Image (spheres, helix red, strand yellow):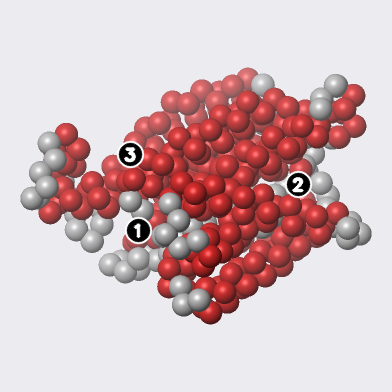
Amino acid sequence: MKSSNQHILLFSIIMPFLIVAVFFISVSFGTKAIQFSEIIDAIFRFDESNANHQIILSGRIPRAIAVLLVGAFLAAAGAIMQGITRNFLASPSIMGVTDGSAFFITMAFVFLPGISSFKLVLISMLGSLFGGALVFGFASVIKNGLSPVRLAIIGTVIGTFLSSFGTAIAMYHQISQTITMWYNSKVHMVNMDLVLLCAPIGLVGILLAIALSGAVTITALGEDVAVSLGQKTRVVKVLSMLSVAILTGTAVALVGKIAFVGLVVPHIIRMLMGVDYRMIIPCSAVFGAFFLSVCDLMSRYVNFPFETPIGVVTAIIGVPFFLYLIRSKGGEKYAA
């Protein structure tokens, strides 16, 4: 307990500084290096005739904020999924949640051209619910389908099907170039209006996840234990999936699909903080913001001056981590 408290204290002190540092590094460096003083001038004394000010306010700051938000949203969604399902492989990208969002966005562009950004976010959330329900529905009718590895396989297969089907429809309707941005992430094309729209919606999902964190801790002990303690497990699971849908749907609508954040970050936080989801969920959100921001920086400099998709960087980190979890934990359910 003492060690855990020390980790919490260090985390609370260090992470704000790291997030501020990575934010300013992200805004300062790019194809064109910009001085810190000019960043401050662009924020407080904006001059629209200054090209550097335009780059900062219309491109780099929205991107840096969006990456922080999406990292927080996906990490919190992954944490709540792992706790509520007691599945160490649970995450939005593996369980078909992000694929459902991207698929519904594709359908919206095909059948609802000119859709507003707000409606697109709502449709993305519905897609998250659809993708997750589809995966868990199939898993529940297959023998041992809810075991971690089999559920991951089912999620990957259904996610691949939704992605392929959505891409085929987009190609048929000649909007594949537009849809590609959502399937490969579009952090370089984020605008501040969309950031300002998505930020409060995602915050609702974060607050709901934190409000449920105590119940998630109990649920992670097992269904029988939770029921014996008087918990309404069905209500908790429904609200948890709603939180995951809000967080994932908002993240996908903002920047598109990004994998493995929701898998890797909660495990790192669990190793540092213990098994109490009252700490895991908020700390995952904070560390997820930092983690994805670092990945974004790496994506810009791996092949500088050309930009590598951020999903490639998260996959380079996430795939070995995924294989390690399968090897080390096998097919057993995660126990808190």
Which structural element holds mark 2? loop
Which residue is nearer to you in this view: 10 or 94?
94
Q: Is residue 246 left or right of residue 88?
A: left
Mark 1 or mark 3, earlier in chain: 3
Instruction: Give the percent coordinates (x, y) of residue 290.
Output: 44, 42
Q: Residues within 10 Å of mark 2 (few under 14, many from 20)?
A: many
Q: Give the quadrant of the C terminus.
A: top right
Instruction: Give the percent coordinates (x, y) of residue 152.
Output: 73, 58
- The kind of residue on which mark 2 rests is Asn
Q: Please tell me which residue is depicted at 63% across the width and 43% down the height of the picture.
A: 244
Q: Which mark is residue 21?
A: 3
Q: Give the quadrant of the N terminus.
A: top right
Whole-number angstrom distance, CA of label 2 to CA of label 1? 34 Å
Question: In front of the other: label 1 or label 3?
Answer: 1
Q: Is residue 118 above or below residue 99?
A: above
Q: Please tell me which residue is depicted at 57% across the width and 42% down the height of the picture.
A: 246
Query: Label 1 belongs to which residue?
Result: 189
Q: Is residue 173 above or below residue 259?
A: below
Which residue is nearer to you in this view: 10 or 97?
97
Instruction: Give the percent coordinates (x, y) of residue 169.
Output: 57, 74
Q: How many marks?
A: 3
